[in-house]
């Protein structure tokens, strides 16, 4: 891709941009120049317009994650209400499965940040009564129903979210992502569909793990945002990042095949390999987030930037990368918790 284009090359007659006397380009952009949702623009773009665009994108991304959080914690609350609604029943004296039932109940309690065993504790902090097998089975049955509903919702989210996101990023939606209200509708569809997928993953994790992963993600995103101002220009590396993503995907698939063929070791090979792949995925995702921030905030030293009409595309791109970072961190924290 060329380092600079003339305004006639960048914008067609039917898609003309507003310019000042110095031929600065403020809005617009032809669909033919859309590469991963980015546009070449002049380095003299008005600073106030660029800051307003960045604030708009970050605001949309915040609203999108608010929708995702609402979906995740709504499903969590429904699950909490269901399992908490089962009346506790203590095991009879001499029940050999009491300790095993308590261990299972403790795991379920952690998923919803509550304690399902309502019996008193002794001086050592241990419960004076174990749950009965019938009680644990009833809780497990309620949980199984919730898991089935959660899986269906996640499937619907996947079938809607992935094709929609790919269509927007590949330019198959035409000018819809740049026109009101289609731009906001597409952002809402992406947020809701990805939220439906995430709720299934979070359903099996302890609520405390979700909060820890969320806090780490927020901290890392803030650090990456600050780094995007002072690190090297990544905006010309879009194809390199895409190639690395494909390579990491192929390595992951090949590694899974190797793990299936390996025997013995108590799963150590799989654990170490998973940690390495998650680490590589986290590093690549962090680079992608810096890349997205630089495309959004722009500047005279950037090879490429988002056009001001691409606020929806920029929001979706940044949203998905932060979403992937959260998933990676959630896997790490969840593994440590177990």
Image: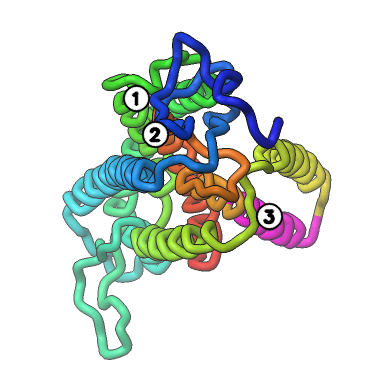
Task: Name the magenta segment's main secondary structure.
Answer: helix
Q: Which residue is mark 2?
A: 311
Q: Nearer the viewer, residue 263 or 36?
A: 36
Magenta segment boundaries in residue numbering: 264-285
- Label 1 or label 2, whichever lies nearer to me, is 2
**Magenta segment: does it hold 265?**
yes
Residue 202 shows in the view: yes
Q: Is residue 69 left or right of residue 160?
A: left
Residue placed at 20% from the left, 77% from the top? Answer: 120
Mark 2 secondary-structure assignment: helix
The answer to whether mark 1 and mark 2 are in CB contact below 8 A is yes
Image location (x, y in percent) of residue 82 = 22, 46
The answer to whether mark 2 and mark 3 are in CB contact below 8 A is no
Residue placed at 57% from the left, 22% from the top? Answer: 10
Q: Is residue 122 above or below residue 251?
A: below
Q: Which residue is mark 1?
A: 183
Between the C-alphas of marks 1 and 3, the distance is 33 Å
Compare marks 1 and 2 and give the one earlier in the sequence: 1
Q: Which residue is mark 3?
A: 280
């Amino acid at each position: 891709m060329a380092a600079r284009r003339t305004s006639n090359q960048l914008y067609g007659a039917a898609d003309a941009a507003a310019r000042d006397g110095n031929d600065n380009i403020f809005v617009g952009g032809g669909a033919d120049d859309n590469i991963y949702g980015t546009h070449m623009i002049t380095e003299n773009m008005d600073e106030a317009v660029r800051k307003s665009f960045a604030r708009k994108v970050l605001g949309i991304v915040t609203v999108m994650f608010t929708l995702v959080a609402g979906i995740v914690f709504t499903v969590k609350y429904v699950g909490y209400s269901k399992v908490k609604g089962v009346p506790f029943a203590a095991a009879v004296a001499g029940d050999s499965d009491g300790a095993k039932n308590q261990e299972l109940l403790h795991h379920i309690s952690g998923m919803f940040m509550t304690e399902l065993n309502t019996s008193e504790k002794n001086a050592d902090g241990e419960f004076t009564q174990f749950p009965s097998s019938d009680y644990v089975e009833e809780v497990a049955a309620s949980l199984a129903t919730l898991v089935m509903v959660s899986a269906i919702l996640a499937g619907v989210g996947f079938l809607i979210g992935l094709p929609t996101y790919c269509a927007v990023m590949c330019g198959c939606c035409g000018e819809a992502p740049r026109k009101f209200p289609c731009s906001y509708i597409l952002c809402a569809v992406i947020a809701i569909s990805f939220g439906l997928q995430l709720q299934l993953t979070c359903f099996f994790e302890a609520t405390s793990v979700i909060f820890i992963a969320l806090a780490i993600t927020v901290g890392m995103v803030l650090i990456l945002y600050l780094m995007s101002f002072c690190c090297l220009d990544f905006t010309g590396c879009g194809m390199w990042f895409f190639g690395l993503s494909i390579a990491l995907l192929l390595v992951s698939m090949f590694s899974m095949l190797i793990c299936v063929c390996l025997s013995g070791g108590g799963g150590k090979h799989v654990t170490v390999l998973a940690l390495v792949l998650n680490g590589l995925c986290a590093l690549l995702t962090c680079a992608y987030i810096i890349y997205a921030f630089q495309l959004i905030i722009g500047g005279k030293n950037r090879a490429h930037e988002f056009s001001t009409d691409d606020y929806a595309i920029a929001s979706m791109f940044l949203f998905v990368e932060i979403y992937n970072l959260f998933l990676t961190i959630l896997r790490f924290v969840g593994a440590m918790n177990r």
